[in-house]
Image (cartoon, coloured by chain):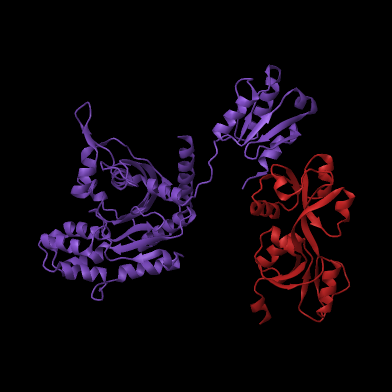
Amino acid sequence: MEPSLEYLRRLGIDLPDEKALSLKCKRSDVEILFVRCSDIPTYIEQNVADFGIIGENVLIEQNCKLPILERLSFGECSLVIAVPYESGISCVQDLEGERIATSYPSSLKQFLRENGVNAAIVQIEGSVELSPSLNLADAVCDIRQSGNTLKENGLRVLENIFDSEAVLISKNYEKILL
Amino acid sequence: MPKEMAKRELVMNKIKTIFARFGYDSIETPIICPAETILGKYGEEGDKLTYSFDDNGGRRIALPYDLTVPFARLVAANWQDLPMPFKRYQIQRVWRAEKPQKGRLREFYQCDIDIIGSKSLLCEAELAKVIMTVFKELGFKQFKIKVNSRRLLNDVLTKFGVGEKAVEVIRIIDKLKKIEEAAVIDMLEELGLNSPKELIETLVQERLGDFDLSEINQFFEYCEKLGVDQKYLEFDPCLARGLDYYTGISFEVYSDEAPFGALCAGGRYDDLCGLFCKEDFSGVGVAFGFERLMLAMEEMGQFKEMQSNSKVLVTIFDKDSIDNSLKIYSSLLEAGINSELYFQPEKLAKQFKYADKKGVPFVIVCGPEEIARGEVALKLMKSGKQKNIPTNQLISYLSSYYEN
């Protein structure tokens, strides 16, 4: 969240120094809402908020078509497929019939579709990297930032699905800016 | 055969879902009908093509030639109990004693929708929207909904002094799509028309400035507001529909992807129920020719390899493992996964062969080793890959399996 606030400050938005889910800015009519990342597209779609700062990965996962106004060069990460070091899976086609754990089922499906691969999708919300060692999955599809978590869990990257960063989105920005 | 039926059911269900989306309810009408309820409703040619026979009790029986007339009869008998206007869909077999050829069978399914009890042109516009939706969702890209007005056609015929011969003239004009203009003109001349060439030119070249086009224009306007893409619509003043009972807007749908005649046709009929009761209900409807849709979709390559209903075959490794296989089979069924059990502990190769022939994508093998480890061996028939997974993950594996 800190880089987002930093970005707002750089835009000259004067944030009050309090903690609340919504903050009215001093000296401007801007109100900042702090909501779950995955809820941001809904707020924008329903015209509850005018602008959103969100990870592009969330937009892609929700198949959200809202226009991106600016790429913000923070929150950089990638969605990758990773497998245990000792795994016999050595290319995307080898994933056929395997169990893939992920919190990104729709991005994963899209990827499988593009590659003509069929597989079982084990949907879990967190600690995805643990699942191969627990025999819950044969591969994972998860966000990689530094790569340390993957390494710590004995996983190597098989394929990069997409790169992501924080982006600024809006629905009717042309009208708003008028 | 099962694989053909799987395709037919897939398409039929898609069509039904679309009809239901627009608020049409389903009905069925009898197949064996007293001949007088069918004959004489479609003109001479229709009568010739109607299957009729005497039953063992010497009653004259006919089989439905289409679904519109039986529907009109049903409405005439039950209109007091029906919501009016009444929107129904009906998918049933009809029979025509024709020489069978590609896209033309003696026994075939029609998928009809009709709105009865409203004269509003909004009905026609809605039908155009249904037609567009069906063709788009069945994967057609190049299709044209040809539209004309029988009222307009009658006006043109009146101007050319056609008078009493209108029915025959319309039937000849209807042939314009199959035979040359000159031949049609000859036929009209033979019929004793004074200026057949001018009549045909008026229609073909759309010289319609002197006629009332308000019905057609209003229809196109409503279609536009309803989001019927204009690229799919085409006004065709020559469109005549050979049947006698049309009175207003009529439709025929053609597709470059299916060069064997109209895939869907219909129109407004004002007086059809009047044949069966005193009440007067205006109706409008179209019939989709199911066999032709199937043929076109087949040629367009719309069907993937069809699978059998069962997704999983549970094999029986040997006599001792029957109980375990039964337990797995039962748990799959309870989880709502389409599956089946091989009935005998035969050689696995034979059980695999059965799955292969039937097109079952997953085969489960569970011998003493797997049982000891709490696992099942799962064979993916498409790739031939085999993998072991914990038995208690089997259901989640199968239900979360993503298939292209």
Relative to B70, residue A108 above or below:
below
Q: Which chain is red?
A: A
In the image shown, does B284 or A4 lie closer to the viewer? A4
Relative vertical location of residue A87 with respect to residue A9 in this rendering, above or below: above
Tell how many labels: 0
Q: Is residue B115 visible?
A: no
B312 or B99: nearer the viewer: B99
**Position of residue B292 measured from the top left corner of the image (x, y, whole percent):** 38, 48
The quarter of the displayed image where residue B64 is located: top left
Quarter of the image for residue A41 reads: bottom right
Instruction: Tell whether A171 sits left or right of B268.
Output: right
Chain purple in the figure, letter? B
Q: Name the spot of residue B307 as percent of width and height, x first.
A: 55, 39
- The x, y position of residue B186, in whole percent, is 15, 62
What residue appears at the point 26 percent right and 68 percent down from the top-left corner?
B204
Residue at the location (62% across, 33% down)? B312
Residue B163 in sight in this render: yes
